[in-house]
Amino acid sequence: MKAFILFTLACLANLAHAAAPSQQLFAADGQLAAVYRDGALHVTVPFDGRTSRPAKLDLEVLDPNDKPVAHRTGTFAAGRGRSSWNVIVPVGKAVSLEDLAWHRLKIDAGNRSKIVSISEILRLPVVRLFAQRSYAAGSHASARIIATNSKTGRPLRGSVVRIELVDGKRSANLFAGRTDALGTVRAEFRLPKDSFGPRQLRVTAVTHLGAVTADQPVRLERRDRILLTTDKPIYQPGQTMHLRALALDGPTREAAGDQSIVLEVEDAKGNKVFRQRGRTDRFGIASADFELADEVNFGPYHVRVILGEEGATTIQEKTVTVDRYTLPKFKIEVELEGDAAKQGATYYAPGEPAM
């Protein structure tokens, strides 16, 4: 009886040892990892020396409530020169990547098993875009893109990178290329000439870990140069101001021809007394004449030119004075010096020095 009890206890101990999950199970020659692509979880399961290379595996994806959402069973063999199994577990596109990070993965290999959080083993691509926050419309621009592994930080070499300029539902391709051995690429592109306002620079990287997209807000600005001139700096009531504006494109220095332009004048009290809307000619020039009334507010007048449409304009101002002309008042005093002054003379003879 005593021998039977000892034998039973020994059997139970062996059974418990065989059924208990091993903490060092799949960690001898590699690291357990997973990649999510096209609705499937690509799992790399490293094995140790105690496991035969062709092995039957049972992989199951469990949601936070331990409900199975995906399952894959089969006999898998490692590739030549490798010590891991590559198993594809179809999850379905109904489960988003954000939700999948909260799930767990259960791996059974014979009498060995392991349950891990998918967020701990999931390998994701990370893309970083280094670019300016504002650009001149129509200018040449450049940016730096870096693609790395989210867990290891290693560069993702050979990733296909694309940059788009997004305006609402519309987009324009700016650049396409591949990352180098350091996982980086320098992108050079030209921005649209007639696109102004807030936009998005969208970079998409297609890597062996999957595709990733990042957006950065940018603003395309007008950087025109405007020369605003008047025919003189001071005017009297009843006279005419002759206004003239020359507009050039900032990056290229070309004439800003056929552009919407507004010329306006404000008096010394902030009242708009003149406004003319038109378009620049092919040389980027616009002009206007403003006749002052006989009774006006005196003081500094602000002459302003506005180039472009609302939301994307370039403004230049100039100040002139409106006042009545006044003759300058001055007094001339002559102080005599020299021998003639000492002798009390009130005049100098021709040829004598006055000073």
Image (cartoon, grey):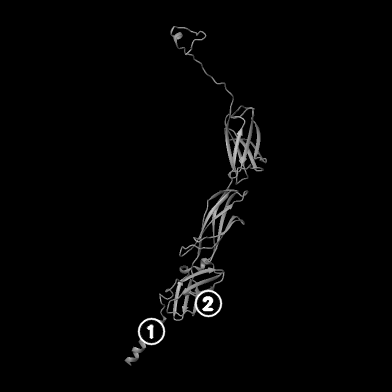
Q: Disc 1, disc 2: CB below 8 Å?
A: no
Q: Residue 75, percent across and down?
A: 51, 80
Q: Is residue 97 left or right of 9 when viewed as pictured? A: right
Q: Indicate which disc, 1 or 2, sits on the residue closer to the N terminus.
A: 1
Give the distance between the C-alpha atoms of the residues marked 1 and 2, in whole angstroms.
Answer: 29 Å
* Picture quadrant where residue 272 is located: top right
Residue visible at 33% across and 88% down in the picture: 6
Q: Is 151 placed above or below 89 here?
A: above
Q: Position of residue 14 (x, y in %)?
A: 38, 84
Q: Residues within 10 Å of mark 2 (few under 14, many from 20)?
A: some
Q: For mark 2, what is the residue?
A: 72
For residue 31, what is the image quadrant? bottom left
Q: Is residue 269 above or below residue 54?
A: above
Estimate the x, y position of residue 343 in percent, counting from the top left.
44, 6
Where is residue 18 shown, x and y percent of the image? 41, 82
User: Would you name the residue on which mark 1 appears?
Assistant: 14
- Amino acid, disc 2: Arg
Near-viewer residue (263 or 59): 59
Q: Secondary structure at mark 1?
A: helix
Q: Is residue 324 left or right of residue 181?
A: right
